[in-house]
Amino acid sequence: MRAAGNSGAQRILCSGGKSAQAQQHGSDAPDPDVLRVTGLKKYFGGVKALDGVEFSLRKGEIHALVGENGAGKSTLIRVLTGVHSFTEGTITLDGAPFAPHTPQQAKARGIQVVHQEFNLLSHLSVAENISIEALPRTRLGLYDRAEVRRRARTALDGIGLTDVDVDATISTLGIAHRQLVEIARALQTDSAILILDEPTATLTDREKLRLFDLVRALADRGVTVVFVTHHLDEVFRICDRVTVFRNGKTIATEDVAGSSPAAVVRHMVGRDLALTPAPRPPVAADAPVVLALDDFRVTGSRAATGVTFELRRGEILGIAGLVGAGRTELLRSIFAVDPVASGTLRRDGAVVTLASPAQAIAAGMGFVTEDRKDEGLILSMPIAANTSLASMAHVTRFGLLRDGDEAALATRQGAQLQLKFGKISDAVSSLSGGNQQKVVLAKWLATKPDILLLDEPTRGVDVGAKAEIYTILRDLADAGVAMLVVSSELPELMALCDRILVMAADAIQGCVLPQDYSEETILKLAYGQT
Amino acid sequence: MTTTTSNAGRSFRDLINRAGIGMALLGLVIFFSVTTEHFLTPNNITNILTQITINLILGVGMTFVILIGGIDLSVGSILAFAAVIAGKAITLPGLGPTEAILLAILAGVLAGLVCGLLNGFLSAYWSIPSFIITLGMLNIARGAALQVSDAQTIYAFPKAFEQFGSALIFGIPLVFLLALALVGIAWFILNRTVLGRMIYGIGNNEEAVRLAGHSVFRYKMIAFSLCGLTAGIAAIVYMARLNIASPIAGIGFELNAIAAVIIGGTSLNGGRGSVIGTLMGAFIIGVLANGLILLGLSDFMRQMITGVVLIVAVVLDQFRARYGRAA
């Protein structure tokens, strides 16, 4: 397979390499960098998505791009591929200034990206998908089916996919093959730089190996590959250099050979944590267990054994893990949004089976969801209506709304959370992200829960509001509310939680206690390095 | 839903939303008053009110369904089916006039309710787009109406029933007052009850409503049931007005009802709109139909212009939706 891949890649480069060759002829001392980004800044309104990025690519290297969620990796890719413009800085491509305004312009210059979510038309054939950007026509202007199939065959053979039928419908292919088809599509148009955005997120180990072989073969033929990943083992397996982003800035670019996973993790998380935890007294060992899971498996769980843990009154239990580790799924199953596959849930010691969110609420639970716009709030409706949504019984009588009661409830809850708003009848969409999140909290606190499930409680919230939310959550814990907090921000978990469970692949990999809190420890568990 | 708004974009949106429809209606009325002789006469006004009554009743139910993000294509057929059932009931031998009328009303309204309930159950339980389910029901109810009636028109109703259909109170048709009462009830439900809150909530963000512990299924069922119920009421009004129960009644009525709701500013995506808008929408369609004929335009021209108005209304809706996102 590898031999086929090599010869194919060579064929691609016969056409793709021309421009590079021509350029090398033109200068005596060829610049090793095909792409150079200096002082790049990208602001969205007041938000600094990129705040001084330095980045360069050498021809034919595999360059890893790593950083926590929100560090700016995706933004840089969007700038390079012409989706976003940039605010400040310079980009040079092959020695000439480069500022693509559309994805087409970026593609014309040989920059291709394969996204994490595929951009394939699932009901069309492989061949049609590969040629979809510019369908060839016959002399009569008709769709040239033979040419489409021929191009697809060439493109697929080029990356060693000789076993894929060009007439197969995309929906009949597995995830790994779909991704390879995307790569084939990206490469058929003379790519000089191929960006792979978390390419291994959905692949099995064997599929990963095939992908790595392919990426290496491409690089050997002169294609520059940018490899965005959360997985450090992949960085150290196939990449030549690694660039670490944090908070929109480039922290370091290092040769992989001269670096170590520990060093990269240190760059990723940094030392200057703004939100340092003020220590909380440990939860009393005799505090009653309010929620206990025993071999609890979500539907579709990849793990052989289920999740087991106990949550005590007034305890804040963190759940760390990478995206896709099964954290959100766990919370959704606890709250009976999604069905449970097996295992038991005990509430105050008694085994209960919850069939719906309504029953979970009746059992004293609340669920602050990850995505407040899609799941948490009714944006166009007033603050008051959103606050009362989970406790309608308190503001109604015989099915009739009592506006006064509702406004009073919302005002009371809002005051408790220091919600900043104009009028309680204003639409929630008029609030800032932090205040919207407070409305979500207010909605659940209005139900007077004993247990709060929080999924990314401070996502998209500015630093000030973040600190306020931390204070709110700690006060709640002091008042006896037990909390399960899922977060991708490790400083957040370490600042808030009494214990942190680390999840990977729907299973708990370990439990970290405050005295052992460090991002290295948690990340190693999350990445499966023991 | 009186959302007080602060920024300019939203108040502009509100302006189009609320005043826009009223202004358009007022403009039409002024236009036809000036250009035609008979538009603003008591007789003609009675005429218009009579003509829009059935569409308005159907539109009230349709508003509920469209607010939750659904659609009901079957109300015209349900009207025919309910009319045939009520016609069978009212012509049962051996009943006194009062009993016959009461039984007919009960049977007709119930028939409509059951059809609506089925629509709601099937689409909500299996999460099938209501477009498909109600398209099926459009055929089922029409077929059932023809089957039950042997494709025969039923007639010869008690006198009192006919009088109900043609009664005027100070020149206003009694049936229009009934429709207006339904608008009032619907307004109350939508604005003052938990049911109304949930209907708007589901139309805006079904998942948030579900996660807050409410049964989305139940409220969807109720919305479709109410739509069927109004189709049953419309069937009774139809019978009382025309003194017949025809299995081919109401063909295409669903489209007029949808048009009234959409012209009234309710979003086809759900979650935004009001039954007062539907009242305006029904008036705009009725005034246009009446005025254009008074102007001497053919019925075909009237149909074309109504179509144009509908498209303009939907384009405005898209514009509003985009404005809403940006704001």
Image (tube, coloured by chain):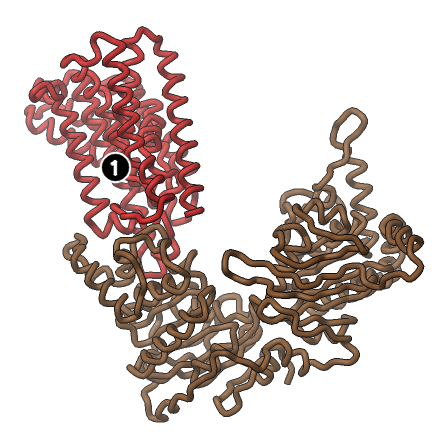
Question: Which residue is located at x 80 percent, y 36 percent?
Answer: A146
Disc 1 packing (10 Å; few <14; some 14–19; many ≥20): many
Q: Quadrant of the C terminus of chain A?
A: bottom right
Query: How far from the left and from the top, in percent, is residue B11?
Result: 33, 42
Query: How far from the left and from the top, in percent, is residue A221?
Result: 87, 60
Query: How far from the left and from the top, in percent, is residue A358?
Result: 31, 63
Q: Is residue A512 left or right of residue B108?
A: right
Residue A298 visible to an observer of this rendering: yes
Could you say which is closer to the camera, residue A489 or residue A40?
A40
Q: Residue under mark 1: which chain is it in?
A: B
**With respect to residue A266, does A89 lie above or below?**
above
Q: Is residue B250 left or right of residue A106?
A: left
Residue A181 visible to an observer of this rendering: no
Could you say which is closer to the camera, residue B137 or residue A377?
A377
Query: How far from the left and from the top, in percent, is residue A270?
Result: 59, 79
Question: Which residue is located at x 25 percent, y 40 percent?
Answer: B226
Which residue type does callout 1 highlight? Val
Q: Is residue B20 left or right of residue A134?
A: left
Tally of numbered tags? 1
Mark 1 highlights which residue? B275
Palette colour of chain B:
red
Palette colour of chain A:
brown
Question: Which residue is located at x 78 percent, y 63 percent?
Answer: A215
**With respect to residue A257, does A117 lie above or below?**
above
Question: Which residue is located at x 66 percent, y 42 percent?
Answer: A124
Q: Quadrant of the N terminus of chain A?
A: bottom right
